[in-house]
Amino acid sequence: MKLGLRYILVTTAFCVGAGGCAAPSRVVTYNGGHAHTGYYDSRPLRELRGLKWKYDTGATLVTSPLLAHDGTLYFGDGDGWFHAVDIQSGKEKWRFNAGKTVAGCPTIFRDRAYWGCGAGILYVLDPHTGKELGRFETTGRVKNRDGSICFPPLVHKGIVYFTSHDSCLYALDAGSLDLKFSLKTENSMCCSPSLWDNLIFLSNVSGYVSAIDLNERALRWRFKAGKNVYHAPAVAEGVAYFCSHDHFAYAVDAATGEEIWRFEADGAISKEPAVRDGVVYFNTLLSHLYALDAKSGRLIWDLRTEGKAYSKAIVAGDVVYWGSGDHNLYAVSASSGEILWQFEADDAVNYPSCHDGMVFFGSGGSVYALE
């Protein structure tokens, strides 16, 4: 099946194996889980006491998102370092030099951290020590082209899936890093694949959103937005929600790709939406936050601030958190849009993350922990 997609089944890989592991098979990932709903099943921070700690990476940029797990916060920076810091104290546990801009946070599976970077390498690290356990090089890197990996991988049933600027989706064995298959699209991809009902969802800079059937290793459906779609859909209740630089938020049937509704915002939308309790939350690059009815696309409430926003909205409990271009992180009532509190950082605010009554985010070259 062509339609701009090609499947390439291969038997070789450019990797150093990570070996087997009998550790528990729980997958720890960002953005609320495999479906990328942006909902964090964690105690929300409704009343802000203040800054708990601030960690300076020494770089000019903290890449997003961040991942909190087992007492450690994981994130990357624009100078090519992986960081692991203690959640409570903000003290560094370890750092690892990947050589080029790091793809936010890892995905952790069987006590291994799978972490990509701009050098076109997917690293496997020990999450406790930062020791390298294995690596896989993208085709782009092998051919001295752009093979950057810019968002965390998806791990499902022992397979690691990730996308690259070399236009490929890769599927690797989580233990050996052997390449199971790769899929070539017509343009660069910079998304973390999302998952629902054995379908993997992808997007690319040509504006295509695709659903891949993992049983058949074949294209199930494809949808074309007006402009770039940088992130894979958030999927909830059988509906895939995504946003585009064409100013529209879309809802399509996750099984068929049939459009259900679209909503026109006042500017380009570069990040994926969050979905919780029948409401879709997203913000434009113009720092305009929207809440829509998930079934109809009807506007429920909106909130405008100033500046260019590089963040996305997430939800914990009944609170929406998002970073505005005015250098503030906002906590907003999910039902009304009322501002509960705001915190001013030194620079533009990147993706927030919520864990056990704390909120973490990057701004400039620093990470902030609020309590």
Image: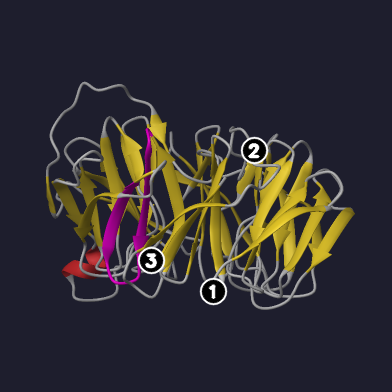
Residue 309 % position (x, y): 63, 71
Distance from label 2 to label 3 (Cα)? Answer: 37 Å
- Which is more N-terminal, label 3 or label 1? 3
Q: Which of labels 2 and 3 is toward the front? A: 2
Residue 192 visible in the displayed image: no
Q: In this view, does 336 lie to the left or right of 193?
A: right
Q: What residue type is labelled 3?
A: Ser
In the rendered view, tell whether residue 98 sits above or below residue 41.
below
Q: Is residue 84 magenta?
A: yes
Which residue: 82% across, 52% down?
292
Q: Which of labels 1 and 3 is toward the front? A: 1
Please give the label number shown on residue 167.
3
Q: Secondary structure beneath disc 2?
A: loop
| Circle 1 residues within 10 Å: few <14, some 14–19, many ≥20 | some
Q: Does the magenta stretch include residue 254?
A: no
Residue 11 % position (x, y): 17, 46
Which residue: 28% across, 42% down?
113
Distance from label 1 to label 2 (Cα)? Answer: 24 Å
Q: Is residue 256 left or right of residue 248?
A: left
Q: Nearer the viewer, residue 369 or 9?
A: 369
Chain part drawn in magenta: 70-85
Q: Residue beneath label 2, please?
A: 44
Residue 151 % position (x, y): 41, 57
Magenta stretch mostly in which secondary structure? strand
Q: Nearer the viewer, residue 3 or 225?
A: 225
Q: Residue beneath label 1, please?
A: 347
Q: Secondary structure beneath disc 3?
A: loop
